[in-house]
Amino acid sequence: MAYSDSFPAVRPVFQSDFANGGRIDPRISYSRSTTGTYFGTDKHESSQNLITNSEDFSAWTAVNTSPTANAVASPDGTTTADTITGTGTGSIARRVQSNTLNNVSYPVVSVYVKAGTHNYIQVMSNWSGSHYANFDVTSGAGAVGSLGGNTTATIQAIGSTGWYRCVCRFNVASMSAEIFVSLVDSTSAGHAPTTTSTGTVHLWGAMANTQGDLTNIVKYQPSTTQIHREYAPTLQTAAINAPRFEHSASDSASEVMGESLGLLVEGQSQNLFAYSDDFANNWTITGNVNVSESAGISPTGGLNADLIYADDTAADSHYLFSSCTVSAAAHTFSVYAKYAGVQYIQLQHRVTGVGIGQFDLVNGTFVVSGATGAMEPVGNGWYRCSVTETQSAGTAFGRIWLMGGSGVSDYNWDGDSYSGVLLYGAQYEANSFPSSLIACNGSATTRAADSASVVDSSLFDNGSGAVFVETGSVSTTNYPTPLTISDQTSSNLVRLQGNSTGTNMEFQCKADNSLIVQVSTPFTASGTKLAASYNTNAFSFCADGGTVVSDSSGQLPEGLEKLHIGTDWNGSNTITGHIRRIAVYPALSDTNLQALTS
Protein backbone atom coordinates (compact mmCIF):
# COMPACT_ATOMS: atom_id res chain seq x y z
CA MET A 1 0.00 0.00 0.00
CA ALA A 2 1.48 3.38 -0.97
CA TYR A 3 1.96 6.04 1.65
CA SER A 4 -0.52 8.32 -0.11
CA ASP A 5 -3.20 5.65 0.31
CA SER A 6 -2.43 4.94 3.95
CA PHE A 7 -3.33 8.10 5.85
CA PRO A 8 -4.97 7.43 9.22
CA ALA A 9 -8.30 9.08 9.79
CA VAL A 10 -6.61 11.57 12.11
CA ARG A 11 -4.76 14.33 10.30
CA PRO A 12 -1.06 15.00 10.90
CA VAL A 13 -0.06 18.15 12.78
CA PHE A 14 2.93 18.47 10.42
CA GLN A 15 4.03 16.72 7.23
CA SER A 16 6.39 17.29 4.34
CA ASP A 17 6.63 15.18 1.18
CA PHE A 18 10.12 15.91 -0.14
CA ALA A 19 10.12 13.20 -2.79
CA ASN A 20 6.98 14.37 -4.56
CA GLY A 21 6.90 18.03 -3.54
CA GLY A 22 10.51 18.86 -4.32
CA ARG A 23 10.47 21.91 -2.08
CA ILE A 24 11.10 23.02 1.48
CA ASP A 25 8.03 23.79 3.61
CA PRO A 26 8.31 27.47 4.68
CA ARG A 27 8.13 26.33 8.32
CA ILE A 28 11.38 24.39 7.87
CA SER A 29 14.67 26.20 8.49
CA TYR A 30 17.26 24.81 6.08
CA SER A 31 20.94 25.67 5.77
CA ARG A 32 24.30 24.41 4.50
CA SER A 33 27.16 26.90 4.61
CA THR A 34 28.94 25.52 1.53
CA THR A 35 27.93 24.30 -1.90
CA GLY A 36 27.05 20.63 -2.35
CA THR A 37 26.80 18.22 -5.27
CA TYR A 38 23.86 15.98 -6.19
CA PHE A 39 22.10 14.36 -9.14
CA GLY A 40 19.02 16.38 -10.05
CA THR A 41 16.64 16.09 -13.00
CA ASP A 42 18.96 17.63 -15.60
CA LYS A 43 20.63 15.50 -18.24
CA HIS A 44 23.50 16.21 -20.62
CA GLU A 45 24.82 14.78 -23.87
CA SER A 46 27.45 12.46 -22.48
CA SER A 47 28.98 11.18 -25.74
CA GLN A 48 28.43 11.57 -29.46
CA ASN A 49 29.66 10.52 -32.89
CA LEU A 50 27.85 12.25 -35.73
CA ILE A 51 29.35 10.00 -38.42
CA THR A 52 27.67 6.66 -39.03
CA ASN A 53 29.49 3.37 -39.72
CA SER A 54 32.61 4.64 -38.00
CA GLU A 55 34.48 1.34 -38.41
CA ASP A 56 32.80 0.02 -41.55
CA PHE A 57 34.27 1.87 -44.52
CA SER A 58 32.62 -0.56 -46.94
CA ALA A 59 29.40 1.28 -46.04
CA TRP A 60 30.92 4.54 -47.28
CA THR A 61 30.70 5.50 -50.94
CA ALA A 62 33.92 4.42 -52.66
CA VAL A 63 35.35 6.51 -55.50
CA ASN A 64 38.35 5.01 -57.30
CA THR A 65 39.19 2.94 -54.23
CA SER A 66 38.67 -0.63 -53.14
CA PRO A 67 38.10 -1.45 -49.45
CA THR A 68 39.06 -4.64 -47.65
CA ALA A 69 37.14 -4.94 -44.40
CA ASN A 70 38.69 -6.08 -41.12
CA ALA A 71 42.09 -6.53 -42.71
CA VAL A 72 44.53 -5.44 -39.97
CA ALA A 73 44.72 -4.84 -36.24
CA SER A 74 43.27 -1.51 -35.12
CA PRO A 75 44.61 0.72 -32.33
CA ASP A 76 42.51 -1.18 -29.76
CA GLY A 77 44.04 -4.50 -30.78
CA THR A 78 41.00 -5.94 -32.56
CA THR A 79 41.16 -6.90 -36.25
CA THR A 80 38.61 -4.31 -37.29
CA ALA A 81 40.64 -1.83 -39.36
CA ASP A 82 39.99 -1.66 -43.10
CA THR A 83 42.58 -1.48 -45.88
CA ILE A 84 41.86 1.09 -48.59
CA THR A 85 43.52 0.52 -51.94
CA GLY A 86 43.64 3.07 -54.77
CA THR A 87 42.45 1.63 -58.06
CA GLY A 88 44.62 3.81 -60.26
CA THR A 89 41.55 4.65 -62.35
CA GLY A 90 41.00 8.25 -63.35
CA SER A 91 42.61 11.18 -61.61
CA ILE A 92 41.04 10.98 -58.16
CA ALA A 93 41.43 8.21 -55.60
CA ARG A 94 39.35 8.83 -52.53
CA ARG A 95 36.42 7.68 -50.39
CA VAL A 96 33.30 9.65 -49.64
CA GLN A 97 31.07 9.46 -46.58
CA SER A 98 27.55 8.71 -47.76
CA ASN A 99 25.67 10.75 -45.13
CA THR A 100 25.90 14.42 -44.21
CA LEU A 101 26.64 16.41 -41.10
CA ASN A 102 23.43 18.39 -40.84
CA ASN A 103 23.67 21.92 -39.45
CA VAL A 104 26.60 21.06 -37.19
CA SER A 105 28.53 23.87 -35.53
CA TYR A 106 32.33 23.72 -35.46
CA PRO A 107 32.65 19.94 -35.90
CA VAL A 108 35.85 18.15 -34.92
CA VAL A 109 36.43 15.32 -37.42
CA SER A 110 38.99 12.59 -36.86
CA VAL A 111 40.05 9.25 -38.27
CA TYR A 112 42.74 6.75 -37.29
CA VAL A 113 45.17 6.13 -40.18
CA LYS A 114 48.16 3.86 -40.67
CA ALA A 115 50.35 3.97 -43.75
CA GLY A 116 50.42 0.92 -45.96
CA THR A 117 52.25 1.52 -49.22
CA HIS A 118 50.81 5.05 -49.44
CA ASN A 119 51.88 7.81 -47.04
CA TYR A 120 49.51 10.77 -47.41
CA ILE A 121 45.81 11.28 -46.80
CA GLN A 122 43.35 14.16 -46.73
CA VAL A 123 40.30 14.75 -44.58
CA MET A 124 37.93 17.12 -46.33
CA SER A 125 34.44 18.52 -46.10
CA ASN A 126 32.56 19.53 -49.25
CA TRP A 127 31.07 22.49 -47.38
CA SER A 128 32.08 25.38 -49.69
CA GLY A 129 34.48 22.92 -51.29
CA SER A 130 37.61 24.10 -49.51
CA HIS A 131 37.69 22.80 -45.94
CA TYR A 132 40.45 20.22 -45.69
CA ALA A 133 43.64 19.09 -43.97
CA ASN A 134 46.45 16.99 -45.48
CA PHE A 135 48.41 14.54 -43.29
CA ASP A 136 51.68 12.63 -43.65
CA VAL A 137 51.09 9.27 -41.94
CA THR A 138 54.52 7.81 -42.61
CA SER A 139 55.61 5.94 -39.51
CA GLY A 140 57.48 8.37 -37.26
CA ALA A 141 56.60 11.46 -39.29
CA GLY A 142 53.05 12.39 -38.46
CA ALA A 143 53.18 15.83 -40.07
CA VAL A 144 50.23 18.06 -40.88
CA GLY A 145 50.50 19.76 -44.25
CA SER A 146 48.38 22.39 -45.97
CA LEU A 147 45.00 23.47 -44.63
CA GLY A 148 42.03 24.91 -46.42
CA GLY A 149 39.36 27.41 -45.46
CA ASN A 150 38.69 27.88 -41.75
CA THR A 151 40.33 24.55 -40.93
CA THR A 152 42.77 23.74 -38.14
CA ALA A 153 44.36 20.35 -37.62
CA THR A 154 46.65 18.20 -35.50
CA ILE A 155 47.94 14.63 -35.53
CA GLN A 156 48.49 12.22 -32.62
CA ALA A 157 50.80 9.22 -32.71
CA ILE A 158 49.35 6.10 -31.03
CA GLY A 159 52.49 4.85 -29.33
CA SER A 160 54.89 2.98 -31.59
CA THR A 161 52.15 1.14 -33.49
CA GLY A 162 52.36 3.22 -36.67
CA TRP A 163 48.79 4.43 -36.13
CA TYR A 164 47.96 8.13 -36.09
CA ARG A 165 44.82 9.96 -35.19
CA CYS A 166 44.31 12.65 -37.82
CA VAL A 167 42.15 15.42 -36.39
CA CYS A 168 40.77 18.55 -37.99
CA ARG A 169 38.29 21.17 -36.90
CA PHE A 170 36.05 22.89 -39.41
CA ASN A 171 35.49 26.33 -37.93
CA VAL A 172 32.06 26.87 -39.39
CA ALA A 173 29.02 27.99 -37.40
CA SER A 174 26.61 25.73 -39.28
CA MET A 175 28.00 23.06 -41.55
CA SER A 176 26.01 20.61 -43.66
CA ALA A 177 28.50 18.51 -45.55
CA GLU A 178 29.83 15.14 -46.54
CA ILE A 179 33.16 14.01 -45.14
CA PHE A 180 35.86 12.69 -47.49
CA VAL A 181 38.94 10.64 -46.64
CA SER A 182 41.22 10.73 -49.69
CA LEU A 183 44.59 9.44 -50.84
CA VAL A 184 46.78 12.40 -51.86
CA ASP A 185 50.32 12.71 -53.27
CA SER A 186 51.79 15.03 -50.61
CA THR A 187 50.92 17.22 -47.65
CA SER A 188 50.88 20.21 -50.02
CA ALA A 189 48.11 18.78 -52.19
CA GLY A 190 45.17 21.14 -52.67
CA HIS A 191 41.57 20.53 -51.73
CA ALA A 192 40.89 18.69 -55.01
CA PRO A 193 43.68 16.09 -54.91
CA THR A 194 44.69 14.32 -58.11
CA THR A 195 46.44 11.00 -57.75
CA THR A 196 46.57 7.74 -59.64
CA SER A 197 48.00 5.86 -56.68
CA THR A 198 47.43 2.15 -56.35
CA GLY A 199 48.86 2.24 -52.83
CA THR A 200 47.18 1.33 -49.55
CA VAL A 201 46.32 2.97 -46.26
CA HIS A 202 44.55 1.49 -43.26
CA LEU A 203 41.56 3.31 -41.74
CA TRP A 204 39.67 2.89 -38.49
CA GLY A 205 37.50 4.87 -36.11
CA ALA A 206 36.05 7.87 -37.94
CA MET A 207 34.32 10.39 -35.70
CA ALA A 208 32.70 13.81 -35.82
CA ASN A 209 31.62 15.61 -32.68
CA THR A 210 31.06 19.06 -31.25
CA GLN A 211 32.21 18.37 -27.69
CA GLY A 212 35.92 19.10 -28.01
CA ASP A 213 38.54 20.99 -29.96
CA LEU A 214 42.16 20.48 -31.00
CA THR A 215 43.38 21.06 -27.46
CA ASN A 216 40.85 18.76 -25.83
CA ILE A 217 40.35 15.87 -28.22
CA VAL A 218 37.49 13.64 -27.13
CA LYS A 219 38.02 9.90 -26.72
CA TYR A 220 36.81 8.02 -29.79
CA GLN A 221 33.26 6.66 -29.60
CA PRO A 222 32.19 4.06 -32.19
CA SER A 223 28.95 4.31 -34.16
CA THR A 224 26.90 1.82 -36.15
CA THR A 225 24.38 2.47 -38.92
CA GLN A 226 23.04 5.26 -36.70
CA ILE A 227 24.94 8.15 -35.22
CA HIS A 228 25.92 7.70 -31.58
CA ARG A 229 24.34 10.06 -29.08
CA GLU A 230 24.05 9.14 -25.38
CA TYR A 231 22.59 11.20 -22.54
CA ALA A 232 23.26 10.84 -18.82
CA PRO A 233 22.10 12.44 -15.53
CA THR A 234 24.07 15.52 -14.55
CA LEU A 235 26.04 15.81 -11.32
CA GLN A 236 24.98 19.31 -10.29
CA THR A 237 26.25 21.78 -7.69
CA ALA A 238 23.74 23.37 -5.33
CA ALA A 239 24.44 26.86 -4.07
CA ILE A 240 25.14 27.66 -0.44
CA ASN A 241 21.97 27.09 1.65
CA ALA A 242 20.16 25.54 -1.32
CA PRO A 243 18.52 22.17 -0.54
CA ARG A 244 19.41 19.17 -2.70
CA PHE A 245 16.45 17.18 -4.01
CA GLU A 246 18.24 14.22 -5.50
CA HIS A 247 17.10 11.81 -8.21
CA SER A 248 18.36 8.35 -9.10
CA ALA A 249 21.18 8.42 -11.64
CA SER A 250 20.63 4.83 -12.77
CA ASP A 251 18.33 1.83 -12.73
CA SER A 252 18.87 -0.65 -9.93
CA ALA A 253 16.99 -3.27 -7.95
CA SER A 254 15.51 -0.57 -5.72
CA GLU A 255 15.46 2.53 -7.95
CA VAL A 256 14.47 3.68 -11.42
CA MET A 257 16.58 6.24 -13.27
CA GLY A 258 15.14 9.69 -12.68
CA GLU A 259 13.13 8.60 -9.64
CA SER A 260 12.92 11.25 -6.92
CA LEU A 261 14.89 10.14 -3.87
CA GLY A 262 13.91 13.04 -1.66
CA LEU A 263 15.94 15.55 0.34
CA LEU A 264 19.65 14.74 0.57
CA VAL A 265 20.92 15.25 4.13
CA GLU A 266 24.63 14.77 4.84
CA GLY A 267 27.00 15.50 7.67
CA GLN A 268 30.15 17.52 7.28
CA SER A 269 32.94 15.86 5.32
CA GLN A 270 36.29 16.85 3.85
CA ASN A 271 38.01 15.67 0.69
CA LEU A 272 41.55 15.18 1.96
CA PHE A 273 43.07 15.17 -1.52
CA ALA A 274 44.41 18.52 -2.70
CA TYR A 275 43.17 17.83 -6.23
CA SER A 276 40.08 15.81 -7.06
CA ASP A 277 40.90 16.05 -10.80
CA ASP A 278 43.87 17.33 -12.80
CA PHE A 279 45.38 13.86 -12.82
CA ALA A 280 48.03 14.86 -15.38
CA ASN A 281 49.61 17.66 -13.38
CA ASN A 282 48.94 17.06 -9.70
CA TRP A 283 48.87 13.29 -9.25
CA THR A 284 51.96 11.09 -9.31
CA ILE A 285 52.07 9.05 -12.53
CA THR A 286 54.08 5.83 -12.59
CA GLY A 287 54.46 2.56 -14.46
CA ASN A 288 54.23 3.73 -18.10
CA VAL A 289 50.93 5.56 -17.64
CA ASN A 290 49.88 8.48 -19.82
CA VAL A 291 47.15 11.07 -19.26
CA SER A 292 45.16 12.81 -21.98
CA GLU A 293 43.47 15.78 -20.36
CA SER A 294 39.83 16.70 -20.96
CA ALA A 295 39.24 13.70 -23.20
CA GLY A 296 35.70 12.90 -22.11
CA ILE A 297 32.46 14.31 -20.74
CA SER A 298 32.36 13.75 -16.98
CA PRO A 299 29.19 13.17 -14.91
CA THR A 300 28.99 16.97 -14.51
CA GLY A 301 28.34 17.34 -18.25
CA GLY A 302 31.62 19.22 -18.70
CA LEU A 303 34.58 18.23 -20.88
CA ASN A 304 36.73 17.63 -17.79
CA ALA A 305 37.27 13.87 -17.55
CA ASP A 306 40.84 12.68 -18.13
CA LEU A 307 41.81 9.60 -20.13
CA ILE A 308 44.35 7.42 -18.31
CA TYR A 309 46.02 4.85 -20.57
CA ALA A 310 49.00 2.52 -20.60
CA ASP A 311 51.69 2.91 -23.26
CA ASP A 312 53.16 0.10 -25.33
CA THR A 313 56.73 0.37 -24.04
CA ALA A 314 56.91 -2.88 -22.06
CA ALA A 315 55.03 -5.04 -19.58
CA ASP A 316 54.78 -3.07 -16.36
CA SER A 317 52.40 -1.97 -13.62
CA HIS A 318 50.33 1.09 -14.47
CA TYR A 319 48.96 3.38 -11.76
CA LEU A 320 48.70 6.90 -10.43
CA PHE A 321 48.26 8.13 -6.88
CA SER A 322 47.74 11.08 -4.60
CA SER A 323 48.63 11.31 -0.92
CA CYS A 324 47.04 12.95 2.10
CA THR A 325 47.34 12.99 5.89
CA VAL A 326 44.80 10.88 7.74
CA SER A 327 43.75 10.25 11.32
CA ALA A 328 43.17 6.84 12.88
CA ALA A 329 39.69 6.06 11.56
CA ALA A 330 37.76 4.49 8.71
CA HIS A 331 38.43 6.24 5.41
CA THR A 332 36.77 5.92 2.02
CA PHE A 333 38.57 6.37 -1.30
CA SER A 334 36.30 6.95 -4.31
CA VAL A 335 36.49 8.02 -7.95
CA TYR A 336 34.20 8.20 -10.98
CA ALA A 337 35.45 5.87 -13.73
CA LYS A 338 34.35 4.80 -17.22
CA TYR A 339 35.57 2.05 -19.51
CA ALA A 340 37.70 3.30 -22.39
CA GLY A 341 39.37 0.06 -23.45
CA VAL A 342 40.66 -1.16 -20.07
CA GLN A 343 38.04 -3.27 -18.33
CA TYR A 344 39.43 -3.50 -14.81
CA ILE A 345 40.71 -0.91 -12.37
CA GLN A 346 41.78 -1.23 -8.78
CA LEU A 347 41.53 1.27 -5.95
CA GLN A 348 43.99 0.73 -3.13
CA HIS A 349 44.61 2.25 0.29
CA ARG A 350 48.17 2.23 1.55
CA VAL A 351 48.55 2.92 5.27
CA THR A 352 47.82 -0.12 7.39
CA GLY A 353 46.43 -2.80 5.09
CA VAL A 354 45.89 -3.82 1.53
CA GLY A 355 42.51 -2.10 1.20
CA ILE A 356 41.89 -3.31 -2.34
CA GLY A 357 38.80 -2.83 -4.48
CA GLN A 358 38.80 -4.44 -7.94
CA PHE A 359 36.19 -3.00 -10.35
CA ASP A 360 34.89 -4.37 -13.66
CA LEU A 361 33.88 -1.30 -15.69
CA VAL A 362 32.17 -3.36 -18.40
CA ASN A 363 29.90 -5.55 -16.27
CA GLY A 364 29.58 -3.29 -13.22
CA THR A 365 30.85 -5.85 -10.71
CA PHE A 366 33.58 -5.67 -8.08
CA VAL A 367 35.45 -7.63 -5.47
CA VAL A 368 37.28 -6.34 -2.39
CA SER A 369 40.10 -7.60 -0.22
CA GLY A 370 40.86 -6.33 3.27
CA ALA A 371 38.20 -3.65 2.93
CA THR A 372 34.60 -2.96 1.94
CA GLY A 373 33.54 -1.37 -1.31
CA ALA A 374 30.76 -0.23 -3.60
CA MET A 375 30.15 0.43 -7.29
CA GLU A 376 27.35 2.85 -8.17
CA PRO A 377 26.33 3.37 -11.83
CA VAL A 378 25.60 6.99 -12.74
CA GLY A 379 24.81 6.84 -16.46
CA ASN A 380 26.42 6.14 -19.85
CA GLY A 381 29.00 3.71 -18.52
CA TRP A 382 30.16 5.85 -15.60
CA TYR A 383 30.51 4.28 -12.16
CA ARG A 384 31.41 5.71 -8.81
CA CYS A 385 33.87 3.18 -7.40
CA SER A 386 34.73 3.26 -3.69
CA VAL A 387 36.67 1.23 -1.15
CA THR A 388 36.68 1.71 2.64
CA GLU A 389 39.35 0.68 5.13
CA THR A 390 40.20 1.57 8.73
CA GLN A 391 43.48 3.48 8.75
CA SER A 392 46.09 4.33 11.33
CA ALA A 393 47.29 7.92 11.61
CA GLY A 394 49.82 8.88 8.98
CA THR A 395 50.11 9.47 5.24
CA ALA A 396 47.64 7.68 2.99
CA PHE A 397 48.27 6.97 -0.69
CA GLY A 398 45.14 6.55 -2.77
CA ARG A 399 46.21 4.51 -5.79
CA ILE A 400 44.28 3.92 -9.02
CA TRP A 401 45.63 0.96 -10.99
CA LEU A 402 44.91 -0.05 -14.57
CA MET A 403 44.68 -3.83 -14.49
CA GLY A 404 45.50 -6.30 -17.23
CA GLY A 405 42.89 -8.82 -16.08
CA SER A 406 40.22 -9.64 -13.55
CA GLY A 407 42.58 -10.93 -10.85
CA VAL A 408 43.57 -8.64 -7.99
CA SER A 409 47.23 -9.36 -8.81
CA ASP A 410 47.03 -8.71 -12.58
CA TYR A 411 49.30 -5.67 -12.37
CA ASN A 412 52.01 -6.33 -14.93
CA TRP A 413 50.92 -6.09 -18.54
CA ASP A 414 51.81 -4.29 -21.74
CA GLY A 415 49.50 -1.52 -22.89
CA ASP A 416 48.80 -0.40 -26.44
CA SER A 417 49.01 3.41 -26.04
CA TYR A 418 45.29 3.55 -26.77
CA SER A 419 43.18 1.61 -24.24
CA GLY A 420 42.47 3.13 -20.85
CA VAL A 421 39.82 4.52 -18.51
CA LEU A 422 38.19 7.91 -18.09
CA LEU A 423 38.47 9.32 -14.56
CA TYR A 424 36.82 12.17 -12.72
CA GLY A 425 36.29 13.31 -9.15
CA ALA A 426 38.64 11.44 -6.81
CA GLN A 427 37.86 11.75 -3.09
CA TYR A 428 39.48 10.56 0.16
CA GLU A 429 37.43 11.18 3.29
CA ALA A 430 37.17 10.11 6.93
CA ASN A 431 33.90 8.26 6.45
CA SER A 432 32.90 4.62 6.31
CA PHE A 433 30.98 5.38 3.09
CA PRO A 434 31.33 7.73 0.10
CA SER A 435 29.53 11.03 0.55
CA SER A 436 28.65 13.38 -2.30
CA LEU A 437 31.61 14.62 -4.35
CA ILE A 438 33.63 17.50 -2.90
CA ALA A 439 35.68 19.07 -5.69
CA CYS A 440 39.21 20.18 -4.73
CA ASN A 441 41.62 22.34 -6.68
CA GLY A 442 44.77 23.01 -4.67
CA SER A 443 43.83 22.11 -1.10
CA ALA A 444 41.64 19.82 0.96
CA THR A 445 38.06 21.11 0.83
CA THR A 446 35.18 20.74 3.27
CA ARG A 447 31.47 20.39 2.59
CA ALA A 448 29.34 21.63 5.48
CA ALA A 449 26.53 19.60 7.03
CA ASP A 450 22.94 20.00 5.93
CA SER A 451 20.57 21.30 8.60
CA ALA A 452 16.77 21.08 8.38
CA SER A 453 14.49 21.67 11.35
CA VAL A 454 11.20 23.13 12.56
CA VAL A 455 10.79 24.97 15.89
CA ASP A 456 7.16 25.15 17.09
CA SER A 457 6.10 23.97 20.54
CA SER A 458 2.44 24.24 19.55
CA LEU A 459 2.97 21.40 17.06
CA PHE A 460 5.12 19.07 19.12
CA ASP A 461 4.50 19.71 22.85
CA ASN A 462 1.20 17.88 23.02
CA GLY A 463 2.00 15.03 25.36
CA SER A 464 1.38 11.94 23.26
CA GLY A 465 2.05 11.72 19.53
CA ALA A 466 3.33 9.69 16.61
CA VAL A 467 6.00 10.15 13.96
CA PHE A 468 6.46 8.77 10.44
CA VAL A 469 9.51 8.92 8.18
CA GLU A 470 10.34 7.33 4.85
CA THR A 471 14.01 7.20 3.95
CA GLY A 472 15.87 6.45 0.79
CA SER A 473 19.41 5.10 0.92
CA VAL A 474 21.12 6.02 4.18
CA SER A 475 24.49 5.32 5.78
CA THR A 476 24.65 2.17 7.87
CA THR A 477 27.08 3.31 10.58
CA ASN A 478 27.52 6.12 13.08
CA TYR A 479 23.96 5.88 14.44
CA PRO A 480 22.05 7.33 11.46
CA THR A 481 19.11 9.36 12.77
CA PRO A 482 16.22 10.07 10.36
CA LEU A 483 14.12 12.08 12.82
CA THR A 484 14.25 13.58 16.32
CA ILE A 485 11.82 15.79 18.24
CA SER A 486 13.42 17.40 21.30
CA ASP A 487 13.28 20.19 23.84
CA GLN A 488 16.56 21.32 22.17
CA THR A 489 18.54 19.36 24.75
CA SER A 490 19.12 15.66 25.33
CA SER A 491 16.80 15.64 28.36
CA ASN A 492 13.47 15.20 26.58
CA LEU A 493 13.19 13.71 23.13
CA VAL A 494 11.55 11.27 20.75
CA ARG A 495 14.05 9.75 18.36
CA LEU A 496 14.35 7.24 15.52
CA GLN A 497 17.99 6.19 15.36
CA GLY A 498 20.00 3.37 13.83
CA ASN A 499 22.39 1.32 15.89
CA SER A 500 26.16 1.56 15.35
CA THR A 501 26.24 -1.18 12.71
CA GLY A 502 23.14 -0.09 10.83
CA THR A 503 21.35 -3.41 11.20
CA ASN A 504 18.50 -2.13 13.40
CA MET A 505 16.54 1.08 13.80
CA GLU A 506 15.60 2.07 17.34
CA PHE A 507 12.69 4.09 18.69
CA GLN A 508 13.78 5.96 21.81
CA CYS A 509 12.03 8.24 24.27
CA LYS A 510 13.81 10.23 26.96
CA ALA A 511 12.08 12.12 29.76
CA ASP A 512 13.87 14.19 32.38
CA ASN A 513 17.19 12.96 30.99
CA SER A 514 16.24 9.32 31.53
CA LEU A 515 15.85 6.76 28.75
CA ILE A 516 12.27 5.61 29.23
CA VAL A 517 11.77 3.49 26.09
CA GLN A 518 14.10 1.83 23.59
CA VAL A 519 12.68 -0.72 21.19
CA SER A 520 14.26 -1.79 17.91
CA THR A 521 13.44 -3.49 14.63
CA PRO A 522 15.54 -4.41 11.55
CA PHE A 523 15.56 -1.84 8.77
CA THR A 524 16.76 -1.62 5.17
CA ALA A 525 19.54 0.88 4.51
CA SER A 526 18.49 1.21 0.85
CA GLY A 527 15.07 2.57 1.85
CA THR A 528 12.53 2.00 4.58
CA LYS A 529 9.33 3.36 6.18
CA LEU A 530 9.30 3.86 9.93
CA ALA A 531 6.44 4.87 12.24
CA ALA A 532 6.29 5.13 16.03
CA SER A 533 3.58 6.14 18.50
CA TYR A 534 4.10 7.32 22.08
CA ASN A 535 1.52 7.64 24.84
CA THR A 536 1.62 7.08 28.57
CA ASN A 537 2.57 3.44 29.12
CA ALA A 538 1.95 2.73 25.42
CA PHE A 539 4.88 2.92 23.04
CA SER A 540 4.87 1.18 19.64
CA PHE A 541 7.25 1.00 16.67
CA CYS A 542 6.90 -0.49 13.17
CA ALA A 543 9.12 -0.72 10.07
CA ASP A 544 7.93 -1.53 6.54
CA GLY A 545 4.58 -2.92 7.63
CA GLY A 546 6.19 -5.61 9.78
CA THR A 547 5.54 -6.73 13.33
CA VAL A 548 4.87 -3.91 15.77
CA VAL A 549 7.32 -3.88 18.68
CA SER A 550 6.12 -2.18 21.84
CA ASP A 551 6.77 -1.18 25.44
CA SER A 552 3.89 -0.75 27.90
CA SER A 553 5.68 1.22 30.57
CA GLY A 554 6.97 4.78 30.60
CA GLN A 555 6.22 8.45 31.04
CA LEU A 556 6.11 11.03 28.28
CA PRO A 557 8.78 13.60 27.46
CA GLU A 558 7.84 17.23 28.04
CA GLY A 559 8.72 20.53 26.40
CA LEU A 560 9.15 19.10 22.89
CA GLU A 561 9.50 22.01 20.50
CA LYS A 562 11.97 21.23 17.72
CA LEU A 563 11.78 18.70 14.89
CA HIS A 564 15.23 17.73 13.58
CA ILE A 565 15.14 16.22 10.06
CA GLY A 566 17.84 13.67 9.34
CA THR A 567 19.88 14.38 12.48
CA ASP A 568 19.96 14.04 16.25
CA TRP A 569 18.93 16.88 18.56
CA ASN A 570 22.39 18.51 18.38
CA GLY A 571 22.98 18.05 14.64
CA SER A 572 25.09 14.91 15.08
CA ASN A 573 24.49 11.39 13.73
CA THR A 574 23.35 12.65 10.34
CA ILE A 575 21.78 9.97 8.17
CA THR A 576 23.96 10.80 5.11
CA GLY A 577 21.13 9.83 2.82
CA HIS A 578 17.65 10.77 1.69
CA ILE A 579 14.48 11.74 3.51
CA ARG A 580 11.50 11.11 1.26
CA ARG A 581 8.63 12.03 3.63
CA ILE A 582 8.06 12.94 7.26
CA ALA A 583 4.87 13.42 9.26
CA VAL A 584 3.94 14.08 12.90
CA TYR A 585 0.57 12.82 14.22
CA PRO A 586 -1.34 12.49 17.45
CA ALA A 587 -0.88 9.03 18.98
CA LEU A 588 -1.79 6.20 16.54
CA SER A 589 -2.90 2.59 16.86
CA ASP A 590 -0.68 -0.33 15.89
CA THR A 591 -2.93 -0.90 12.88
CA ASN A 592 -2.28 2.66 11.72
CA LEU A 593 1.47 2.23 12.15
CA GLN A 594 1.45 -0.87 9.98
CA ALA A 595 -0.71 0.80 7.35
CA LEU A 596 1.54 3.87 7.19
CA THR A 597 4.66 1.79 6.69
CA SER A 598 3.30 -0.87 4.31
Image (spheres, grey):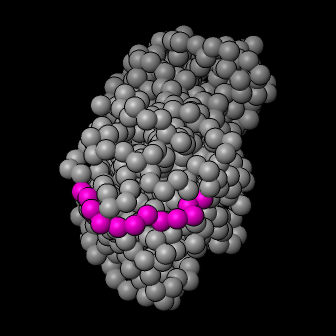
Quarter residue 406 falls in = bottom left
Residue 551 within the segment the image draws in magenta: yes
* Position in image of residue 334 (x %, y %): 46, 63
Residue 422 within the segment the image draws in magenta: no
Residue at the far bottom in the pictured view = 393
Q: Is residue 241 at all visible to an observer of this figure?
A: yes
Asked whether 26 or 413 is in front, the reply is 26
Quarter residue 190 falls in = top right
The residue located at (44%, 51%) in the rendering is 465
State whether residue 154 is above or below residue 292: above
Q: Quadrant of the N terminus?
A: top left
Q: Which range of residues does the magenta coloring cover?
A: 549-561
Asked whether 314 or 217 is in front, the reply is 217
Asked whether 166 or 176 is in front, the reply is 176
In the drawing, does residue 114 fall left or right of residue 529?
Answer: right
State whether residue 69 is above or below residue 497: above
* Position in image of residue 12 (x %, y %): 49, 39
